[in-house]
Image (spheres, rainbow, N blue to C red):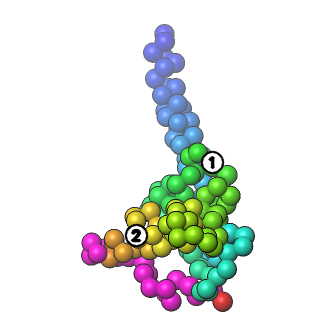
């Protein structure tokens, strides 16, 4: 008798599980390119950067948004507590990962420029690594 109800309910349970997974993964990246904002008080020496999520769609969001699991409300690198150090005065602060510029330019695989350089070095398709290719928004 239990078998009579259990077998038909398996597809329903699997469907509900699949729906839950899809809903959880529904944090979609913006479809339109965005201009990367800078922290308050930062003095720009170059034009701002236009960023498109589309070429990065194969990556997990957490690859760049490293605080997503701890604080899902923070998506911007210039948000308080992330990379919000504008123009630091000391050389020690300029080396800090909290320094906004380092989020994009540090020589590590978690920064834009570092990731692009490592892909290029490995002979894989990579994004731009020169200033003028990224800094285009006047």
Residue at 40% in and 65% down: 108
- What residue is disc 2 on? 107
> Is 129 contained in the magenta span?
yes
- On the image, the x and y values in percent for residue 41 come to 72, 73
- Tell me the crowding category of disc 2: few under 14, some 14 to 19, or many 20 or more residues within 10 angstroms, Cα based: some
Q: In the figure, 3 relative to 65: above or below?
A: above
- On the image, the x and y values in percent for residue 128 come to 44, 81
- Tell me the crowding category of disc 1: few under 14, some 14 to 19, or many 20 or more residues within 10 angstroms, Cα based: few
Q: In the figure, 80 relative to 53: above or below?
A: above
> Is 76 contained in the magenta span?
no
Please tell me which residue lies in front, 3 or 22: 22
Q: In the figure, 111 relative to 21: above or below?
A: below
Residue at 56% in and 65% down: 93
- What residue is disc 1 on? 71
- Which residue of the protein is positioned furthest toward the right in this rendering? 40
Q: In the figure, 66 relative to 94: above or below?
A: above
Under circle 1, the secondary element is loop
- Which residue of the protein is positioned furthest toward the top in this rendering? 1
Q: Are marks 2 and 1 in contact (CB under 8 Å)?
A: no
The magenta-colored residue range is 121-137
Q: Quadrant of residue 116?
A: bottom left
């Amino acid at each position: 008798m239990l078998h009579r109800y259990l077998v038909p309910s398996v597809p329903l349970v699997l469907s509900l599980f699949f729906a839950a997974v899809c809903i959880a993964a529904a944090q979609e990246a913006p479809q339109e390119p965005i201009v990367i904002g800078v922290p308050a008080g930062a003095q720009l020496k170059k034009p701002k950067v236009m960023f498109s999520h589309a070429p990065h769609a194969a990556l997990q969001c957490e690859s760049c948004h490293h605080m997503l699991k701890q604080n899902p409300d923070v998506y911007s690198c210039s948000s308080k507590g992330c990379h919000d150090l504008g123009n630091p005065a000391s050389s020690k602060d300029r080396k800090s990962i909290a320094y906004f510029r380092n989020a994009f330019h540090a020589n590590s695989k978690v920064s834009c420029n570092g990731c692009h350089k490592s892909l290029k070095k490995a002979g894989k398709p990579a994004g731009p690594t020169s200033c003028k290719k990224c800094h285009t928004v006047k």
